[in-house]
Image (cartoon, helix red, strand yellow):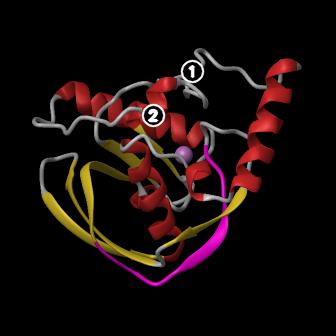
């Protein structure tokens, strides 16, 4: 099932998500629906708060669905190591149509539980590293527009305000 993607400035995007104690059938179904929503968008990743659920769950696929084996369903991720630097353009399904250069680590090591309950450790670089950092930020109520300059942020906020005015940007809730 394709879920509704919450758009900035919906307040659910600013909440800190809760850890998942038990991977229930409900969590598994949520992860599957999030994957379907991500492919439909399309996007490289979706975090549960983006579909209105404050839980530490992500889906990630750096192939955008062209290689089914690349889909990862990630529970309770934590970045345990990071190094290097990347400075590339980034966007977000919750802030559609807006892109800015964002500074990230080029390499991160992420500890997480997979959807079958197995403890995992993965070292990623480049695009996948950026996706993980962006999506894990969502779990802490952090958006990519928080990491850019005030000038870049003002431009995005103005653009969104104008688009809301002409009805080109739909929000369900505002802060
Ligand atoms: Ni995002």
Measuring from the top left, give residue 51's x and y in whole percent. Answer: 46, 28
| Image marks 1 and 2: residues in contact by CB distance under 8 Å | yes
- Name the foreground residue: 155 vs 50: 155
**Residue found 63% across the figure and 38% down from its top:** 41
Q: Residue furthest right?
A: 166
Residue where numbered disc 2 is placed: 14
Q: Residue furthest front?
A: 150
Residue 77 drawn above or below residue 107 = above
Measuring from the top left, give residue 100's x and y in whole percent. Answer: 72, 58
**Residue found 26% across the figure and 34% down from its top:** 28
Residue where numbered disc 1 is placed: 175
Q: Is residue 84 magenta?
A: yes
**Residue found 53% across the figure and 41% down from its top:** 38
- Name the foreground residue: 159 vs 169: 159
Mark 1 and mark 2 lie on one chain; the one further toward the N terminus is 2
Count neighbours of disc 1 (C-alpha within 10 A) and say few if under 14, some if 14 to 19, many if 20 or more. Answer: few
Which element type, helix, strand or loop, lies under badge 1?
A: loop
Residue 96 drawn above or below residue 135 = above
Residue 107 drawn above or below residue 35 = below
Measuring from the top left, give residue 64's x and y in whole percent. Answer: 57, 54
Q: Is residue 97 visible?
A: no
Which segment did they paint magenta?
81-92
Residue 160 drawn above or below residue 123 = above
């Amino acid at each position: 099932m394709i879920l509704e993607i919450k758009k900035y400035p919906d307040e659910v995007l600013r909440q800190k998500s809760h850890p998942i104690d038990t991977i229930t059938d409900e969590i598994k179904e949520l992860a599957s629906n999030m994957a379907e929503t991500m492919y439909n968008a399309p996007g490289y990743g979706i975090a549960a708060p983006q579909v209105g659920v404050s839980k530490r769950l992500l889906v990630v696929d750096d192939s955008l669905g062209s290689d089914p084996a690349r889909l990862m369903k990630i529970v309770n991720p934590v970045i345990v190591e990071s190094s290097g630097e990347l400075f590339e353009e980034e966007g977000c399904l919750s802030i559609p149509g807006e892109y800015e250069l964002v500074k990230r680590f080029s390499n991160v090591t992420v500890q997480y539980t997979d959807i079958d309950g197995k403890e995992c450790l993965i070292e990623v670089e480049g695009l996948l590293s950026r996706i993980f950092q962006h999506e894990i930020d969502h779990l802490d109520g952090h958006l990519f527009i928080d990491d850019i300059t005030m000038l870049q942020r003002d431009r995005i906020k103005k653009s969104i305000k104008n688009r809301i005015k002409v009805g080109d940007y739909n929000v369900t809730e505002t802060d």
